[in-house]
Image: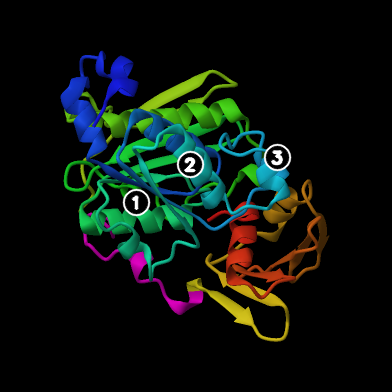
Amino acid sequence: MDFTRYSRQMLFSPIKEKGQQNLADSSVLVVGAGALGTVICNHLVRAGVGKIRLIDRDYVELSNLQRQMLFDEDDVSQALPKAVAAKRKLEKMNRDVTVEAIVGNVTKENMESHIQGMDVVMDGTDNFATRFLLNDACVKHSIPFSYGGVVSSRGMTALFIPDETPCLRCLIKEGGESGQTCDTIGVIAPAVDLVSSLQCTEVMKYLTGNKQHLRNTLKTIDIWYNHQYDMKFPELDPACPACGTHEFPSLTKSAKELETILCGRDTVQIHQQEAMNLDEWEDRLSSVSDTTRTPFLLKAVFQNELKLVIFPDGRVLVQGTEDATVARIMYDRYIGS
């Protein structure tokens, strides 16, 4: 293989020709072709990672262009699936890289097949339900997992390596997330670029055999308010349901936590949380939707005419569709995990 295009990268002493060959021989799964995922794929393809498997369930919209760097207005006008649009751009950057685009939803039923043959899994998602699913699959199959998340002007990232570091569940307990999303409190593109670049840097260290330079922290950064913090990894938690007890809860979720299509009602029910405070959700959603509150439920109507009906017991009805994938996209955008 001709490595001429990587000449400047190979002049970097920790990489050189051996590291470049390692990259060419590597396969990376990127889940999510949105803000984080497009920057991640851009870096990996330009760096010469041999194979990228990219999964995304959504299509390109005008509001994506502010931060999702692989897309343009033509993609919006054609309503292209993000995975397809990204693949087209990436293949023009580097013909030596194999880009596999999968348009679909990542689920507990297909997750383990998606990670087969992958050296690293990278998080380009926008919700913790999917992140915990990725984490559990990676721990089970001993594949490193690069976590990244961004909202507003702040982000977090870490590289978790099974049997060597704690996992995502050790540091962030399921149900303990903020629930904030880019669609409720916004996001600025430089924060996305920074976090995804940090993700790629750690993955490149790992793939090129430079593990001694891994950061081994959960990094938190706010580039607007000038805050930065590195939390050193704790010891592995023997009670962790993933890397401790090997229960892998996201791979064995109960039926209550899955989407349920309510036949004849143009509605999908998602029951993922144990309880939801209607006061808090009214505050969060009132700026991005028309909300109506009763003592029993909160209804939020959005510009696309889809509705969320939230109940105190954690149930959410997505009204206006019987497509479970559309409902899940809507839920993750505005509810999160």
Find the magenta span and give its range: 240-256
User: Which residue position is annotated with label 3?
Assistant: 73
Q: Can you give x and y, in whole percent of width and height, for residue 330 in the image? A: 65, 59
**Measured Cα–Cα span from mark 1 to mark 3:** 38 Å
Q: Are marks 1 and 2 in contact (CB under 8 Å)?
A: no
N-term mark: 1 or 2: 2
Is residue 2 a member of the stretch shown in magenta? no
Q: Residue at x 53, y 48 (%)?
A: 126
Residue to which mark 1 is pinned? 169
The answer to which image quadrant residue 136 occupies is bottom left
* Residue that label 2 marks: 37
Is 248 inside the magenta-drawn segment?
yes
Kindly identify the amino acid type of the residue bearing the numbered disc 3. Answer: Glu
Q: Residues within 10 Å of mark 3 (few under 14, many from 20)?
A: few
Q: Residue at x 22, y 57 (%)?
A: 141
Give the mark nearer the N terminus: 3 vs 2: 2
285 displayed left or right of 156: right
Q: Identify the image's colour scheme: rainbow, by chain, secondary structure or one colour.
A: rainbow
